Image (cartoon, rainbow, N blue to C red):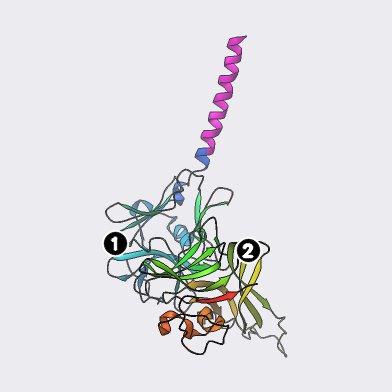
Amino acid sequence: MAPQIHLHFLVLFIVIFSCCCSVLVQSQVPNNQTFQLINQGEYHNKLDEYGSNFRTGGLAKPYENSMAYLIRSKLVTYTFGLYFYNTTPDAYVLGIAGGNMGGTLKWIWEANRNHPVRENATLTFGTKGNLVLADVDGSVVWHTDTADKGVTGISMQTNGNLVLHNKKGKFIWQSFHHPTDTLAVSQSLELKGNTQLVSRTSNRDSHDGHYSIIIDDKKGFIMYQNTSGNLVQYAGWEAKGLSNVTFRAITRIDPVQPPPGPPDYYQYTEAKGKTSYFLSLAGTPSTKRVILAMTDYYHYQYYSFLRLESDGNLVAYSYIMPAAHPFDAHWRKTYAFFGDTVKECALRSKCGSSGKCYGRLCSACPRNGSLGCMISTS
């Protein structure tokens, strides 16, 4: 009987091993979905907010096939795209920009802001499912750390979230979980994950700047300035027990009445409505909603994001697309902490001093820099 038992175990092992091998094969990226982009070629003729040169890059020769258009369509949508850009010669950052329909592009995410790459650097997506940015000398500058984790595809979502997904569509990696200085709508900071946004140094310098906004479960959502290695609190919202902060924007469109007279194919009626921008502060004892702004527009607002600017201000932008003139789409500033929540004079970079502000009642440059412009949420 013993040999039969061993035979049963052998058969069971072979079945399990075959299933595992099948799963591994099925979990790879199909060859016709892999690519390697080389940082070379012509620049786009559109303008961006930093005055940079930017391009999608050229496909390496082994990947120049009938799937080339499909590959590019996975990285660039009608609104957001993944590009190499530079503001100084031969120092490129891989980033996501929005505004392809019209207006000046704005950047919402960067992969290697502190480690620019050079001309002919490569971005490779291989069968193992890892997205790798390597400099021209082959050194790896950045990667998603997703090799052999079941990734089967890559795509740019309509909201600007770059994702790597498995065969069931589940996100294995996403840029929204690795924010730099920006939160898109529905994007969050987590106390147990990515806890902060860090500003750029300037429009011309992508490296980490002097300002950050951080989740603190004892204080709240706090803005700091890095002064000679010391973090000096200068603004924010008090909220003890905070665990999660999410940026949200909700648009409510009023019913549109048809124009009088016979229907005209060329006649457009732009929708009217209100958009509410707010922070959802989750934690104990309950979730709080902090209204940032409420706007009235006669246009469609498709996308919004909240960014910590290089001057330390926290600013929201929305992509406005007039119904009758979609190619007149543009980004518009819809909120600024220093300007809407408190007066702009409280911004340290504007007047050289920070202090205690009481809503909009700050009428001169504050003098007490130890308190900051803290807003109570209780």
Q: Amino acid at mark 1?
A: Arg
Image position of 263 (left or right of 63): right
Residue 247 found in image quarter:
bottom right
Closer to us: 332 or 279: 279
Residue 142 position, x and y percent, is: 38, 55
Give the quarter of the figure containing the N terminus: top right
- The numbered disc on residue 151 is none
- The numbered disc on residue 118 is 1
Residue 92 position, x and y percent, is: 33, 65
Q: Residue at x 54, y 30 (%)?
A: 18
Q: Residue at x 66, y 65 (%)?
A: 287
Give the quarter of the figure containing the C terminus: bottom right
Q: List the single residue furthest toward the top.
A: 1
Closer to us: 159 or 346: 346
Residue 232 found in image quarter:
bottom left
Q: Is residue 4 magenta?
A: yes
Q: Nearer the viewer, mark 2 or mark 1?
A: 2
Q: Amino acid at mark 2?
A: Ala
Q: Earlier in the sequence, mark 2 or mark 1?
A: 1
Q: CA distance from mark 2 to mark 1?
A: 42 Å
Mark 2 lies on residue: 282
Residue 12 drawn above or below residue 86: above
Tag 2 secondary structure:
strand
Residue 7 seen in this snapshot: yes
Point out the stretch of residues depicted in magenta: 1-23
Q: Is residue 362 magenta?
A: no
Q: How many marks?
A: 2
Tag 1 secondary structure:
loop
Image position of 32 (left or right of 207): right
Residue 184 found in image quarter:
bottom right
